[in-house]
Image (cartoon, rainbow, N blue to C red):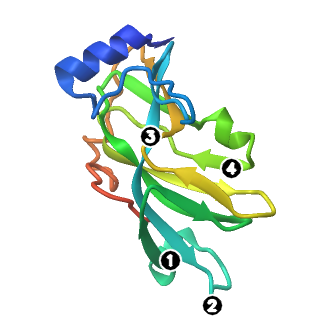
Amino acid sequence: MGVLPDRWIREMSQRHQMITPFANFRRRKGRISSGTSSYGYDFRLSDEYRIPQFDELKCMDPKKMDRIRFRDHKGASCIIPANAFVLARSLEYFRIPKDVLVICQGKSTYARSGIMVNVTPLEPEWEGFITIAILNGGPCPAKIYSGEGIGQAIFVRAESLCDISYQDRKGKYQAQKGITLAGV
């Protein structure tokens, strides 16, 4: 196994549309960086959010997410209430090769503000927009920004191909187009 460098990420995105739209490294004053990094890709937030409504909710149950009401929000930013979370999606659409696993983590800029980003690994031959859970662990509301970096994807090449890829087993989140709630 080995972590793949920025030139491999650029080449795969140009030749095979692994990441679309693709951004080369972008560091602009007053904005959270995005695009390629030395051994990864900093993906961005789209302008679509789903905010859970906890009015009458007594328990969060990942097996019964259909019982939770969500309010849709579209905009240049989103405010996350204190000790709450929102669901969002990546601006980029990913197509992962069969010999690659992608490990995602939040950006330190947000982590230093009490904002935690959770994304599960992107499995071999998975494709879609990434659904992102963003938690505000702080005591006051927190702001996140559309079109700016939210997390980093690290691409790891396997020494051999997996027996059954995400596509082969017809995974339930394959080719997701929007923010996808938990499903069992």
Mark whose residue sits in front, 2 or 3: 3
Instruction: Report the Cα–Cα distance between label 3 and label 4.
Output: 15 Å
Instruction: Report the Cα–Cα distance between label 4 and label 2.
Output: 25 Å
Residue at which label 3 appears = 44
Residue at which label 1 appears = 64
Q: Nearer the viewer, residue 71 or 169?
A: 71
Q: Which of marks 3 and 4 is nearer the N terminus?
A: 3
Instruction: Report the Cα–Cα distance between label 2 and label 3.
Output: 32 Å
C-beta proximity under 8 Å, tags 3 and 4:
no
Give the residue drawn at x 51%, y 80%.
68
Q: Position of residue 95 (x, y in %)?
A: 28, 34
Q: Earlier in the sequence, mark 2 or mark 1?
A: 2
Q: Where is residue 45 in the image (x, y as percent from the top left)?
A: 44, 46
C-beta proximity under 8 Å, tags 4 and 1:
no
Give the residue drawn at x 30%, y 26%.
98
Residue at which label 4 appears = 115
Q: What amino acid does circle 2 point to?
A: Glu
Residue 56 badge: 2
Q: What amino acid does circle 4 point to?
A: Ile
Q: Nearer the viewer, residue 10 or 29?
A: 29
Name the residue furthest bottom: 56
Mark whose residue sits in front, 4 or 1: 4
The C terminus appears in which quarter of the rendering? bottom left
